[in-house]
Structures are given as structure tokens and as C-alpha cells.
């Protein structure tokens, strides 16, 4: 039996809306994944440190505040500096299509916006982890 997929869900910055990320956390737990939720108002440094400490397979960052083009470059720089550049990073929330395309170019492996069905999120994470293989 293989270990469950471990996911850190994080809210970075001043965004105080967390209903959606809690729905996602429940869907992932119901699908058998181990989920850590960072809580609100985290810094990129806190999120990266937690992802490393918790030894997660996936870092999911939920944003509704429009800071995606600022936050993701910081997250990727920190992951690289700490030797965790192989961590799967996904994004969720609300953002313009052009920002979703831009953060994909930075290295975000999937962008799951507010209208993504929970099962599609589960399927995406399973697929990304399977494609990456064991760490």
C-alpha cells in the first residue's frame, strides 16, 4: 500500500476568504489525501517552510487578492534556494486568464479556478503526482 498524497493548501497575503480552500481541503481528504491547511495571511516564506517541514507532494496556493504575479516568483525562488524545486505547485482561486497563463510559465503546474469541480481537482493532483513519480 502506498502512502497517501500529502498536500499543503495555503492562503498567501491579505486575502481573508477561505471558504473555497476549505471545500477543496475536504474534497482532497475525502479522496484519501493527507491535507495540511496553513490558515490565512501567510507569507511565501512561511508557506515554503511549511511545505518542506510537512514533506508534502503538492503545494496548492489559493488566491483571490490579485497578487499571483508577485507571490509565485517568490515561492519558486524560495523553493529553489531550499532545494525543493521538485515540489508540485498548483494555484487556485480567482484570476484573469492572462495571469493564469503567466504563472504557468513560471512553473505552476495547474491552475484550478473557482469553477473547477472538486473531482477535477482531485484528478489533477493524482495525475501530477503520478507523472512526477516518487520523490
Image: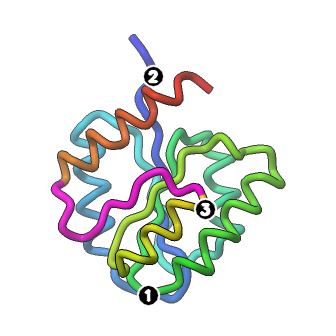
Quadrant holding the N terminus: top left
Helix, strand or loop under label 1: loop
Check disc 1 and report the residue beneath it.
65
Boundaries of the magenta span: 107-117
Residue at image point 25% right, 53% down: 26
**Structural distance between the alpha carbons of marks 2 and 3:** 29 Å
Check disc 3 and report the residue beneath it.
106
Relative depth, front residue between 17 and 122: 122
Direction right: furthest residue: 81
Task: Give neighbour class at mark 2: few <14, some 14-19, many 20+ (Cα, 10 Å).
Answer: few
From the top left corner, tell me how far across and down residue 25 is, in percent: 31, 55
Of circles 1 and 3, the one toward us is: 3
Of circles 2 and 1, the one toward us is: 1
Please tell me whether the stretch drawn in magenta is mainly helix, strand or loop.
loop
Q: Which of marks 2 and 1 is nearer the N terminus?
A: 2
Residue at image point 72% right, 54% down: 79
Mark drawn on residue 14: none
Residue at image point 24% right, 37% down: 31
Mark drawn on residue 3: 2
Residue at image point 77% right, 52% down: 80
Task: Give neighbour class at mark 1: few <14, some 14-19, many 20+ (Cα, 10 Å).
Answer: some
Amino acid at each position: 500500500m502506498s502512502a497517501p498524497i500529502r498536500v499543503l493548501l495555503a492562503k498567501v497575503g491579505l486575502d481573508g476568504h477561505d471558504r473555497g480552500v476549505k471545500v477543496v481541503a475536504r474534497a482532497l481528504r475525502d479522496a484519501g489525501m493527507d491535507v495540511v491547511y496553513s490558515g490565512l495571511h501567510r507569507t511565501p516564506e512561511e508557506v515554503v517552510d511549511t511545505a518542506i517541514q510537512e514533506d508534502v507532494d503538492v503545494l496548492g496556493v489559493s488566491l483571490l487578492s490579485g497578487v499571483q504575479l508577485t507571490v509565485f516568483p517568490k515561492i519558486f525562488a524560495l523553493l529553489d534556494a531550499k532545494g525543493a524545486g521538485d515540489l508540485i505547485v498548483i494555484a487556485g482561486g480567482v484570476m484573469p486568464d492572462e495571469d493564469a497563463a503567466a504563472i504557468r510559465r513560471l512553473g505552476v503546474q495547474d491552475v484550478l479556478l473557482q469553477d473547477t469541480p472538486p473531482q477535477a481537482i482531485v484528478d489533477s493532483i493524482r495525475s501530477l503526482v503520478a507523472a512526477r513519480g516518487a520523490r
